Structure formats: structure tokens, C-alpha cells
Amino acid sequence: MSKLLDTINSVQDFKSIDIAQYPQLAEEIRRLLIKTTSSNGGHLAPNLGVVELTMALHKTFDCPKDKIVWDVGHQSYIHKILTGRRAQFDTLRQYGGLSGFPKREESACDAFNTGHSGTSISAALGIALARDIKNEKFNSLAVIGDGSFTNGMVYEALNQAGHRDTNLIVVLNDNAMSISPNVGALAEYFARIRTAPRYSKLKSDFEQLVRRIPTIGESVAHYAERVKDALKFIVMPGMFFEEMGFTYFGPIDGHNVQQMLDVFQNAKSVGGPVLVHVVTQKGRGYFPAEIKADKFHGVGPFMVSTGEAIKDPEAPESYTNVFADILVDVADERDDVVAITAAMRDGTGLSKFAKKYPSRFFDVGIAEGHAVTLGAGIAAEGLRPVISIYSSFLQRSYDNVVHDVCMQNLPVIFILDRAGIVGDDGPTHHGVFDLSYLRHIPNLVVMSPKDEQELRSMFKSAFNYNCPVAIRYPRGCGVGVDCAQPLEDIVLGTSELLRPGGDTALIPIGAMTNPALLAARQLSERHGIEALVVNARFVKPLDEQALHCICQTMKKIVTLEDNVLQGGFGSAVLEFINEHQYSTKVLRLGWPNQYIEQGARELLLEKYGLAVDGIVESVSQFLE
């Protein structure tokens, strides 16, 4: 049997396929999704759940004229396949290949770049308002998951959209999941909607029955509106959206293409803001992903036959797992430790803590700003909150960090996972800005460990500082050190001498420490250059005593960081040198002031001169 999928090289090719062939096409798409993500990694379960939904959208609407904004965007793989990128799909998330998220530079059918949650309705509304100003005619849609409805920005957008009353279609993809299972009152609210699907039919039947009454039918129908207003809250508590000014359709089966086609056509003709509530199954069509949708939300390479991840058995423990263990160890000793996550209990290593200390664990959903201020409130009452969050996600709560935590000097501990370059997820997820946007905030201590054991020591030491602390570490495995050794009590603002030398000083921070040590050895072996290596450990406060000694004895020094150069660790060293009027010259090695593309971490480090060979070359040229 010939593959339908092989015939689709554009969205027009897809539109030409008969709807009777959609089940076969959906199956072929799912096979391609599983095959590609098993090799490249990626977001499998979200995409398996939206195959039919995406097909119905592209059958009803006309991209690129009509604009579809995918919230977060990790569920846009089928959209890419159907809009002319099927032949390149095997390059997904690879260096130089297709992005794992919508990307305007990649296709005219990608209306808006996304990567973080909760932005789609705002963007789609902005597109719709621009359309109105320019007197153009097209549809603007936001496709957003129920997990994103824990993000406050969603309600700001709904409020504005309902007030403006412009043509806008919001498709709520309800699969009862974000990354971890959804939590909170909103999750319960959507669950109640899903269990009351008969309201729409009941309302329609009621209207038709009343209007058939001779003479008085119309007046009775009008009078009955008040009865229906009460009825809808009793029978189906899904009218929140109508009260916000939206016409509500649903819930409908997100795997029934014909039903969705009918509803989307109605949504196009209604006018004003419309919300279509679609219920889907995350992971549909691949049994391991159906039963463990959270585990298959974002995956690395895996065995298709079993769903088991392909891992190097000799690989060291991940930083995330090391943190998970030390958190529980500290909590065993201290009953004032509280842990907070924003819908990422597994990804940030809080599952062990949550299981052992459920009363001290809080998952706030995709609400990073709330997570930070919640922690501030907890700290104000004398407890010690630990907020574990991805570096790129903390960007969303910057004002909360400044205003609610640091201005009050509250002892909140921020654990920034996925700091630095994260690899195949690309620029929306690289955590290369945190040193720059955190180090200038008063009262905040910022540090980064060179290895797993130092992470454990830093975390335990942070409880001694009695102030806000941020500890950032990279994605993936550590360097393989022995974590059974006793923990070091790290004195605030102290560095660590790792290698003596008199020709120059290499001062790395965090993940760049091990490459700096290797580079120092090669500088000695290849060029006869003896480099001092100092593990900075702290970006703030700097070890000024050590810097004074270095600047008084070295004419040239090199800083190394897994962060953008602008405003980062190297900039802090330059400020110190300028303040104390040293003549020491500084070479700063880090990421340039641009959005770094997707690609394996090792490949990107090599490309940008931050792998060992690149460091050796840069340092030797600098010293010449």
C-alpha cells in the first residue's frame, strides 16, 4: 500500500486528500512521529494527541493566509509535516534542521515564534487587531492546551479579547496534562466540563421545542433565556468563557475529524471571539506514551518496541538527580524546607521530595511569577522555600524576583536547572541569560558549581547565608565525581584554587570549570604556558581578595562562562578591574550577544570556541 504521507509536500496536497483517507494518514503521521523522536528526541506525547486536531484545522483554514499561533509550540510537529516540511522532518531538532517549535524564518505558515507557555492568545489577538486596522480578511487562531490555563497571561488576553469583540478563534486542546499532570482549581474546572458534554445538545433541543409553540413561541423563548442562564451553570459549568465574551463550542472529540470540521466551520461564521473546546488523549496511538504521557512529553532517544530510553549505562548521574537527593537529605534534617515547582516536578527533580513530604510541596502549575511570590510569602513567615525552575522559565518571573524576594531580602533559594546551552530545544530554552539578569539585583547571591559534589555543598551552604540565593547548573550529566564524600561548608564569596601557574589566570564559573582545567593542561603541553586556574564558584559576591592577588601578579587573565558575555561573569570581573584601576587585560569567553541555534551541546561549544581546543587557541593567541 502506497503511503499517503509521501504525497504531501504542501498544505494544498493535504487539502486534496479525501476525508475517507484521513484515518490512514493519521496512522502514517503517528508512525513518522514515533520513528523521528525515537532517534532525535523531542516532544512525542503532545504531538500524538493532536494529529486529528491539526488535520481538521488545516482542512478548515487556509495557511499561510489564516494565522495559527501554537501555544508553547511543542505540539506543532504535525503542522510542520502538513505545511511542506515532511521531507525534512528527519532533521527535527538537529543542528541546521527543523526547529522543535514554530519558527517564522522556517515557513510562512508559522505565524508566530513560540516556546514558552501562555503567549498564544495574546499573540493571536494582536494579529487579529492588526488585521482589523489594515482592513484585511483572514482568521486568527490560538491553539492552547489546558495546562497553559494556569498561566495568568492567558486571562489578561481573554479579558482583552472579550472586551474588543473582534473575530478571534481560541482552540482549547484539553488533554488534562501540561508536563506533569495538571493541578489546581482550573484543572478540576476543565474536568467538570469534560463530564458534562450534553449541555449544548440540551440547549439546542430546548430552543427548538419552545419556538414550535404557536403564537407565543418566540416570546417564551426570549423569556426562557434567563432560565437557560441558570440551567447552563447547573448542567455544565463551562460558561466561564461566555461570561468573558466568547462564544463557546464544546466539548468535542478531538479525534473525530468530521465533528471538528463542522464545529470549526461554525466558529468561522459566528463572528467575535470564539472558544472551541477540544478533548484529546495525550500520547494517542503509542501505548507506552498513552499510559505514561508525562514521561513521553519530552523524550530523548528511545526504543520504539518498548518505549525504554536509550542511555549510556556508564554516564554519570544527572545534576537534576543529584539535586533531588540532596534536597531530600536536607529536608530530613530541617522541617522548615518547602519545595515549589511550576508544573515541572519531574523535570526539576522534585518528585522524590513531593512523595516523601507532600504537605511541604507545592506545584502551582505553569505560573512562574506566582511560584516566586508564593515562595516569598512562605519565607516571610520563617520557612525556607526552595523554588526549582528551568533557567529560561525564571525569565518570566523577573519582577517577582526583584520586588517580592530580593527587595525584602527573603531567604528564598532558587535552583536554576537547564542553565547555559541546553542543546536541541534551541533558543527558546537555552538558559544563557541568568547570570546577566540576576547578578545586578541587590541582596541576591549567585553561584554555580563545577561538578555534582560542589552542587550538593552549595545547596546545603545556601541555608547558612540567610538571604536570597540562586544556584544554576547545566542540563544533563555531571562530570562523574564521587558524591559520597563529606560536604564542604562553602564560605560566602570564596573561590577555589584548582591549578597553580604564573603565565596567566583562567577563571571559569560553573560548567566551564572542567574545560578550563583541560585547556590549562593542553596549554602547558602544547605551548609551554602555565595557567593558573581558579574556580570562581560565586558570580556574586565575587572573591575580591583572590581577584586582587591575581590582578597584582598577572598582566592577562581569561574568564570563562556558559552565559552571554554581555553583563555576565566576565563583565563582573571587568567592573572589578576598572573600579580598582588595575591595568590587567581580560579575555572573556562565553556566548555572543545573539540567540544561539539548536544543536548538540558539544557541537555548539565547538562552533563558538568554548570547547577545550577553542579555549586553548583563544588563550594562546591572547597571550601572544
Image: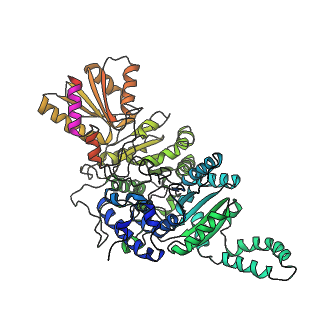
Q: Nearer the viewer, residue 523 or 406?
A: 523
Which residue is drawn at the image coordinates 71% and 77% (left, top)?
A: 204
Q: Main secondary structure of the magenta part?
A: helix
Seen in the picture, residue 188 relative to 363 is either above or below; the reply is below
Figure disc tally:
0
Q: How are the residues colored?
A: rainbow
Residue 37 seen in the current view: yes
Residue at 35% x, 70% y: name it. 31
Tell me, yes or no, whether the highlighted magenta stretch contains residue 618. Answer: yes
Let me know if residue 388 is in the magenta part: no
Highlighted range, magenta: 611-621
Q: Quadrant of the N terminus?
A: bottom left
Q: Quadrant of the C terminus?
A: top left
Q: Position of residue 401 (x, y in %)?
A: 52, 42
Rendered location of residue 467, percent (x, y)? 48, 40
Let me know if residue 291 appears in the view: no
Q: Looking at the image, is 44 positioned above or below residue 603?
A: below
Judge whether 50 appears above or below 197 on screen: above
| Front residue of this view, candidates 161 and 575 | 161
Q: Is residue 60 left or right of residue 79?
A: right
Residue in the image at 50% along x and 64% along y: 58
- Residue 295, quarter of the rendered image: bottom left
Q: Nearer the viewer, residue 351 or 192?
A: 192
Specify the quadrant of the image occupied by residue 146. bottom right
Residue 255 in the image: x percent, y percent? 49, 73
